[in-house]
Image (cartoon, rainbow, N blue to C red):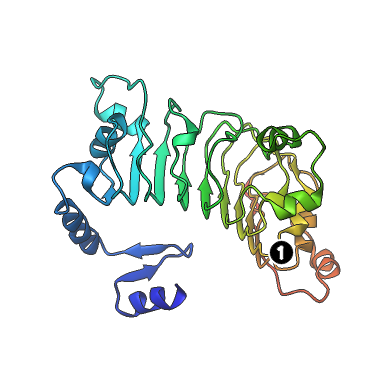
Amino acid sequence: MQTRIQNLTDRCVLTIGPRNELMMHKLLQVLGRQKVRQEATNPWKRSRLWCYTDSYEVLRKDRNKKKLFGMVFDQEVFKKKNPDVHEVDKYHLSKMNNLKLLQLNHVQPNWSYDDFPEELRWLCMHGFPLESIPIELPMKNLVALDLSRSKINVFYKSDSIRQQLNGTTPQLTESDLRDNPSFPSLKILDLSVCEKLSSVCDFLELPALERLMLVDCSRLIEICGTIKDCNRIVFIDISYCYSLKDHKRLCRLRNLAELSLIDLERPTNEEISGMRQGMPELTINYKEVSG
């Protein structure tokens, strides 16, 4: 994958942005969208949907959408532009077996989570209205999960819920969680600006995690100590998390390469050296904002 991206950047098809994001020239984007429109007249027969009107039509109709690879929809923006459109009783997420990329922002869940495509790699749901992640949501193949600006209050799956899924009653051990994690492929987790989020727990569920974003979670008080078991994590951003306790201990994470602490107390160089003996160099992004 890295080689393919390098080939595209060498040919100026892609560029790498300041936040390490992939960017494409607007003209190439227009040409690509024209090609997708030519795939079919009916939007549910296309491979990608970025127009909210098309996505709305596909979501509200129970049709075969097996060719669909990616879809974007923001209900809040769509309703502002289309105030006369009636609320849909149920969005249809079934029959999308090939869907890999899905963005459903500010959508009230009126579907069965059993209908969610099992092959999803990227799921973005800004404004997610529930307090926890539904146990029916298929998460085994997810690589990136973005629940920014949602109402989630605790990110974890409790033993009681896991027992309901497994049909067991004994308490699950750490070994059980390691052998059967809920998010075995998840590399990127973004819970930024979740105003009700108080705790992020059970990192044993996230063995592949590399990037964790918790920016401006004003009520966040705890990042579970099991984060030490995330051996692949290289980037954490906890900027503006004023209620978070003992954030300096994150410097002990062996493979952590970058830690953002904007407007939080910065550990001294002596503290960092004491916690990272024999570990790779750690870059700390720090800026004091509040007076």
Q: Is residue 264 visible?
A: no
Q: Is residue 183 visible?
A: yes
Q: Amino acid at mark 1?
A: Asn
Whether residue 123 sits left or right of residue 73 in the image: it is right
Q: Is residue 101 above or below residue 80?
A: below
Work out which quarter of the rendered image holds the C terminus and state it.
top right
Q: Secondary structure at mark 1?
A: loop
Q: Is residue 244 above or below residue 19?
A: above
Q: Is residue 10 above or below residue 98?
A: below
- Horizontal and vertical percent for residue 157? 68, 39
What residue is rendered at 40% in x and 64% in y?
22
The residue at the far right in this view is 274
Whether residue 13 sits left or right of residue 41 in the image: it is right
What residue is rendered at 36% in x and 36% in y?
74
The residue at the far front in this view is 167
Work out which quarter of the rendered image holds the N terminus and state it.
bottom left
- Horizontal and vertical percent for residue 197? 65, 35
Mark 1 surroundings within 10 Å by alpha-carbon count, few (fewer than 14), some (14 through 19), many (20 or more): some
Residue 7 found in image quarter: bottom left
- Front position in the image: 263 or 241: 241
- Front position in the image: 175 or 5: 175
Whether residue 149 sits left or right of residue 284 in the image: it is left
- Horizontal and vertical percent for residue 41? 13, 45
Whether residue 79 sits left or right of residue 180 in the image: it is left
- Front position in the image: 129 or 243: 129
Residue 155 found in image quarter: top right
Q: How many marks?
A: 1
Q: What residue did someone put label 1 on?
A: 231
What residue is rendered at 64% in x and 45% in y?
240
- Horizontal and vertical percent for residue 255? 70, 68
